[in-house]
């Protein structure tokens, strides 16, 4: 039997199912009544995991949600072509093809062979969970000025192998690998 979650127990990052669709809670607020007989309400800011749409909805505290049939499976990025983006499920060794809508802007930080976690709902892939950091090669940047590296302050624009443009320290050169945060799309350190 499926586990039921009370609306009052939904907090940030809680996953639940509503109308046969998986959702993730982004924020929550409980409003308790001041008058007798009033109902406690829970206002949730939620993301539809199939469409990525975000909206707010209010529920009664006692409403119940099913726990969604979600699983995270390790996968590696293989390549992309006209059909979509191809990943290898590391458990079943099945090749899974995802569309632009599912991938979103993840390709800014993915190179062939990158290991990610793929979210599956009822056995079908619906999204990616990227690693916290990825290592990418700098393909284009201006040379640093002599003496720039001593101060340690200052940045310059750089283009990475995926086409992503970020700011890097002045001492970084073309051909070097840098560690990039997948959440903020910013330079973290040399790789």
Image (tube, rainbow, N blue to C red):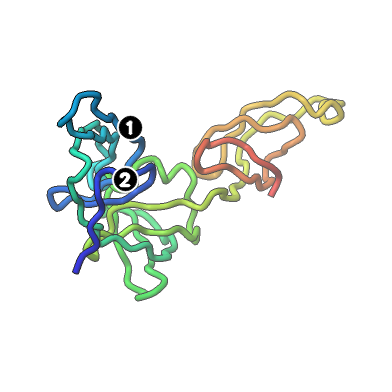
Tell me what residue is drawn at x 31 percent, y 51 percent. 15
Left or right of 59? Residue 140 is right
Q: Nearer the viewer, residue 147 or 55?
A: 55
Residue at figure coordinates x 24%, y 62% from the top left: 3
Query: In the picture, residue 36 is in which quadrant?
Result: top left
In the rendered image, which residue does mark 1 sit on? 29
* 95 up-or-down from 138: above or below: below
Q: Position of residue 51 (x, y in %)?
A: 23, 42
Instruction: Return the residue nearer the eye: 6 or 133.
Output: 6
Quadrant housing residue 78: bottom left
Looking at the image, is 74 positioned above or below residue 184?
Answer: below
**Is 78 on the left or on the right of 145, as rendered?**
left
Gap between marks 2 and 1, in whole Å? 10 Å
Q: Quadrant of residue 33?
A: top left
Q: Circle 2 is placed at which residue position?
A: 10
Residue at 22% over, 33% down: 41
Q: Residues within 10 Å of mark 1 (few under 14, many from 20)?
A: some
Q: In this rendering, would 10 be left or right of 77?
A: left
């Amino acid at each position: 039997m499926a586990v039921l979650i009370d609306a009052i127990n939904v907090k940030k990052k809680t996953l639940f199912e509503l109308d046969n669709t998986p959702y993730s809670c982004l924020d929550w607020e409980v409003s308790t009544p001041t008058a007798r007989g009033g109902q406690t309400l829970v206002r949730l800011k939620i993301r539809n995991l199939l469409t990525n749409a975000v909206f707010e909805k209010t529920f009664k505290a006692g409403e119940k949600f099913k726990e969604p049939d979600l699983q995270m499976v390790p996968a590696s990025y293989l390549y992309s072509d006209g059909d979509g983006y191809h990943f290898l499920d590391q458990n079943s060794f099945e090749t899974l093809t995802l569309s632009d809508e599912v991938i979103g802007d993840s390709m800014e930080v993915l190179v062939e062979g990158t290991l990610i976690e793929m979210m599956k709902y009822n056995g079908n892939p619906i999204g990616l969970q990227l690693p916290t950091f990825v290592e990418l090669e700098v393909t284009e940047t201006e040379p640093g000025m002599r003496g720039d590296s001593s101060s340690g302050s200052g940045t310059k624009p750089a283009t990475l192998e995926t086409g992503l443009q970020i700011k890097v320290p002045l001492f970084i050169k073309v051909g070097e690998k840098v560690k990039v945060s997948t959440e903020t799309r910013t330079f973290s350190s040399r790789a």
